[in-house]
Amino acid sequence: MALKSDLTRGTLLGLIILGIGGRLLMRVIAHMEGRTPVFTAPGSVTVVFAGTVAGAFAGFIYYLLRRFVADPWIRTAAFIVICELISWRGVSGLLPLPQAMFMSLALVYLVIVDLVGRRSAPPHYHS
């Protein structure tokens, strides 16, 4: 049951924050760089899908950490570090400002996943 709720939470928040939020952030960056933003349905679907899959993966990481790391602060720190390192790999080819913006978006996502996860954790998961 915990796996299902962690995957669902990670996936849904990934869809909204990483997928839709990432697509909106791409538009902001295009404006900042003086480029004409281009909207294509296939491109947007790809970005939203990637954010959703990344969210599911993060939900699975969260589940594993909740299962095997008892201390909530160590668990939170490990979750953020692991997922931010994975995110860094994905944005490492971007210019510094867009990198920072996408890493910040990922951090917002991770903090929200952790906060919601702490509130919804079964009693046996709390230390």
Image (cartoon, rainbow, N blue to C red):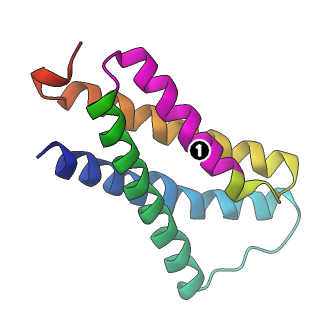
Camera-side residue: 66 or 96? 66
Disc 1 marks which amino acid? Leu
Q: Residue at x 66, y 43 (%)?
A: 103
Q: Secondary structure at mark 1?
A: helix
Neighbor class of circle 1 (other Cα within 10 Å; few <14, some 14-19, many 20+) is some
Identify the main secondary structure in magenta.
helix
**Residue 17 coordinates in the image, percent (x, y):** 46, 51
In the figure, residue 91 lies in which quadrant?
Answer: bottom right
In the figure, residue 34 lies in which quadrant?
Answer: bottom right
For the record, the magenta segment spans 69-88
107 in relation to 125, above or below? below
**Residue 79 coordinates in the image, percent (x, y):** 47, 34
Q: Which residue is mark 1?
A: 105
Q: Residue at x 59, y 44 (%)?
A: 105
Camera-side residue: 58 or 48? 58
**Residue 44 coordinates in the image, percent (x, y):** 55, 77
Q: Residue at x 74, y 73 (%)?
A: 37
Q: Determine whether, in the image, residue 42 is placed left or right of residue 10.
A: right
- Image quadrant for the C terminus? top left
**Residue 119 coordinates in the image, percent (x, y):** 22, 25
Q: Is residue 75 magenta?
A: yes
Q: Determine whether, in the image, residue 119 is placed left or right of residue 59.
A: left
Q: Determine whether, in the image, residue 38 is placed left or right of residue 35.
A: left
Q: Residue at x 30, y 41 (%)?
A: 63
9 in relation to 30, above or below? above
14 in relation to 70, above or below? below
In the figure, residue 65 lies in which quadrant?
Answer: top left
Camera-side residue: 27 or 118? 118
